[in-house]
Amino acid sequence: MARYEFRLPDIGEGLAEAEVARWLVSVGDDVAEDQPVVEMMTDKASVELPAPGAGVIVEQRAAEGETVKTGSVLYVLETEAKIGASDHAPAAQVEERAAAAPSASGDAAGILAPPAVRKLAREMGVDLGHVKGSGPGGRISAEDVKRHASGASPSAPAAPAAPSAAPAMAGQRIKLRGVQKRMSETMALSARTIPHVTGFHELDAGAFAELASRMRREAEKRGTRFPFDTLLVRAAAMALRRHPAFNSSLDVESGEIVQHDDVNVGVATATPDGLIVPVVKRADTLDIASLAAELDRITGAAREGKVAVHDLLDGTFTISNTGAWRGGFGTSLIPLPQVAMVAFGRIEDKAVVRDGAVVARPVMPMSVTFDHRVIDGEAGLTFALTLRTLIEDPSQLEPSS
């Protein structure tokens, strides 16, 4: 029998670590080839990792809730099968060695930082050549980049707690984990680095709501589902094609705005594990039925905790709809490195003036948030007007359009 050390592979395009969400087997258990052994939680999704061969689990090197670096040993498998060292190679080690070479962007040779940390540095405008790494061999972590950006010293001692005459407040402490932990970090980074501007608009949603109801009924007759957000994604995709500046990202390191060829619309989805944003790829190229089916697939998988990592990547714009929770207007935090997003609220009857008379009409709140480094106020209002036109007169959103 041979002992095989299973190392955490790169399960999400440059992710440097993942959290052990749940062991699916115990030490001493027999496992078959491709049998799921452990569920890992990244900043984007939960992923089950299968056994590379049949055998017996003889060691577990990480406990549930523990964060494991890419390339670290997760468990030891005793097996008679011949498993090549490359079958589950620690991809991050290869990527990190390649990333340490000189690059066209001016990074100095010998900088040890995984791809995810390099991406973070670009987003924060930090030159890695000036960052002192706290890891082995000077390896730079995300915390090192954030510390450098804030101007804090790596060796600075923590400030002593202020004296208090009152005893510490009692209460339950809940550790930030997985998706929730990563969301807290990315949202804080977004708030620190992006100058957000939000415009608030009220839309007459009568025709839009009628179209959505009719298409839902038609889908039910066919035995399919038609999520309400389908028409919102379609409207956003059409508006993005007309206003490419909103379908962009900002490369701080190069000082360039990247206007993306594909329109990939992320849809903020509430799940038991926190907010997840699955992405409808090339949303502007899908017909209405295909768009509804894809949206139903990815948001359903997100709510069940089964969304694939590739369905969470490459978003170029994000929408949020809080109508189901009676949400109204709200400011949003733009997911980096995107430059804009839109949030919709609940459609409710309100008193409005039409042709000089006060009447009740279904009104939907819309909040358009953009990065003022890339988009100015006039462009923001023009984009909002395009969305407003598509929603208030939704004939362009119908299948025949």
Image: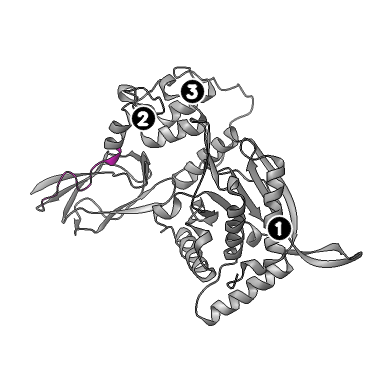
**Does 112 appear in magenta?**
no
Q: Kindly report the secondary structure that dominates the magenta region of the rendered protein.
A: loop
**Which numbered disc flags the more N-terminal residue, 1 or 3?**
3
- Which residue is denoted by mark 3 in the rendering? 148
- The numbered disc on residue 388 is 1
* Mark 1 secondary-structure assignment: helix
- Which residue is denoted by mark 2 in the rendering? 113
Kind of residue indicated by mark 1: Arg
Q: Quadrant of residue 103?
A: top left
Q: Nearer the viewer, residue 14 or 328?
A: 14
**Which numbered disc flags the more N-terminal residue, 2 or 3?**
2
- The answer to whether marks 2 and 1 mark residues whose Cβ atoms lie closer than 8 Å is no
Graded by Cα atoms within 10 Å as few (under 14), some (14 to 19) or many (20 or more), the crowding at tag 3 reads many
- The numbered disc on residue 358 is none
Q: Position of residue 33 (x, y in %)?
A: 19, 58
Picture layout, residue 319 above or below residue 10 = below
**Which numbered disc flags the more N-terminal residue, 2 or 1?**
2
* Mark 3 secondary-structure assignment: helix
Left or right for 378, reference 100: right
Instruction: Identify the magenta region.
Output: 82-92
Left or right for 391, reference 82: right
Kind of residue indicated by mark 3: His
Residue at position x 54%, y 69% from top? Answer: 288
**Does 86 appear in magenta?**
yes
Q: Nearer the viewer, residue 153 or 296?
A: 296
Residue at position x 69%, y 52% from top? Answer: 384
Left or right for 78, reference 73: left
Residue at position x 13%, y 45% from top? Answer: 3
